[in-house]
Amino acid sequence: MDSRELFDLVLVVVAGLLAYTETFGFADPRATLAEIIAVLATLDIRVYLVLGGLFGMSFVAYLVVYLPKKDARSARP
């Protein structure tokens, strides 16, 4: 693993921990996990469809835009 990737991973973990403690404080983690699951379970199906569509579009864009550029750069004559 590259040192930059490790640094980025540490930043993501720290940001996640800060966001969690800012939102829920230092409460019981089991209770907050149950609250998160309850909120996700009560969301409308349209929210999941929109999120799935956004993920799908991002994946297709990755396949169509990024991978051909990467392949063209790595191809040797």
Image: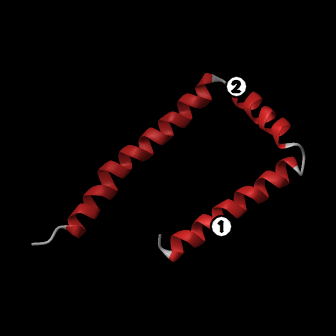
State the residue in front, 35 or 64. 35
Residue type at mark 2: give it: Ala
| Quadrant position of residue 51 | top right
Q: Is residue 62 above or below residue 45?
A: below
Q: Is residue 23 left or right of residue 10?
A: right
Q: Residue at x 22, y 68 (%)?
A: 74
Q: Is residue 67 left or right of residue 50?
A: left
State the residue in front, 33 or 23. 33
Residue type at mark 1: give it: Leu
Query: Horizontal and vertical percent for residue 64?
Result: 30, 50
Give residue 41's mark. 2
Q: Is residue 65 above or below residue 11?
A: above
Query: Horizontal and vertical percent for residue 21?
Result: 83, 54
- Callout 1: few (<14), some (14-19), or many (20+) C-alpha neighbours within 10 Å? few
State the residue in front, 58 or 33. 33
Q: Which of the two discs, 1 and 2, labels the residue nearer the N terminus?
A: 1
Q: Is residue 66 left or right of residue 58?
A: left
In the rendered image, the quadrant that contains the C terminus is bottom left
Q: Is residue 44 left or right of residue 50?
A: right
Q: Residue at x 61, y 23 (%)?
A: 45
Residue position for label 1: 11
Q: Is residue 72 above or below residue 63?
A: below
Q: Please, what secondary structure does the residue beneath circle 2 have?
A: helix
Question: Which residue appears farthest toward the left when viewing the image?
Answer: 77
Q: Please, what secondary structure does the residue beneath circle 1 have?
A: helix
Query: Horizontal and vertical percent for residue 52?
Result: 51, 34
